[in-house]
Image: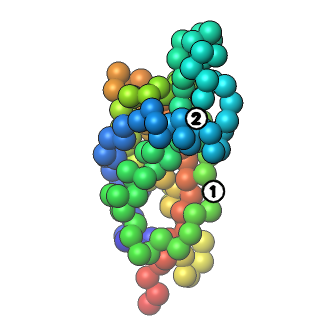
Amino acid sequence: MFFDDIKLNTQIDIPPAVIEKDKMVDFAKLYDNIPLHVDEDYAKSTHFGKLIAPGVMSFMSVWAKYLEVDIIGEELLAGKSTKIEWYKPVFAGDILTGKATITKLTERNERNGIAEITIQVSNQKGELVLTNVTEAIVKRRIN
């Protein structure tokens, strides 16, 4: 979808992402190897009571589902920035669902613009667990 065709406040439902324990621990061992993510005995001794998923892994699980929807498609030129905020822990077995909203459109030049996409992610209890704001550079129609 060209930048010129994107409408402000458009919302897209993101398919559910299931946080699988094995994948969660494998990701943590590679990219966020701290006891709260990989050591069950340690995690039991914390106020969480069990392992929690790495925040970036939780986000990326939902991001992968967002990309399946592929609202922008071939007109996406590049990502510009992203900001993730975490509000609640994510555990193995959680089912994360999201809603993406086009929250800002900025004309950049005659070739492209910036679409700001805000994603709100909730667990199966309806609790907000994270938000993400991404800026995407999107191709414009050239007249």
Going from N to C along the chain, the mark reached first, 1 or 2, is 2
- Report which quarter residue 34 is drawn in: top right
Q: Is residue 48 above or below residue 31?
A: above
Q: Residue at x 44, y 90 (%)?
A: 143
Label 2 amino acid? Pro
Q: Residue at x 60, y 38 (%)?
A: 28
Horizontal and vertical percent position of residue 55: 57, 36
Q: Residue at x 67, y 36 (%)?
A: 33
Give me the C-alpha separation between circle 1 and circle 2. 20 Å
Residue under numbered circle 1: 81
Label 1 sits on a secondary structure element that is strand
Q: Is residue 116 visible?
A: yes
Q: Is residue 4 visible?
A: no
Label 1 amino acid? Ser
Label 2 sits on a secondary structure element that is loop
Q: Are marks 1 and 2 in contact (CB under 8 Å)?
A: no
Check the picture and name the quadrant holding the N terminus: bottom left
Q: Seen from this angle, which residue lies furthest bottom? A: 143
Horizontal and vertical percent position of residue 61: 45, 45
Which of the numbered marks, if any, corresponds to residue 54? 2
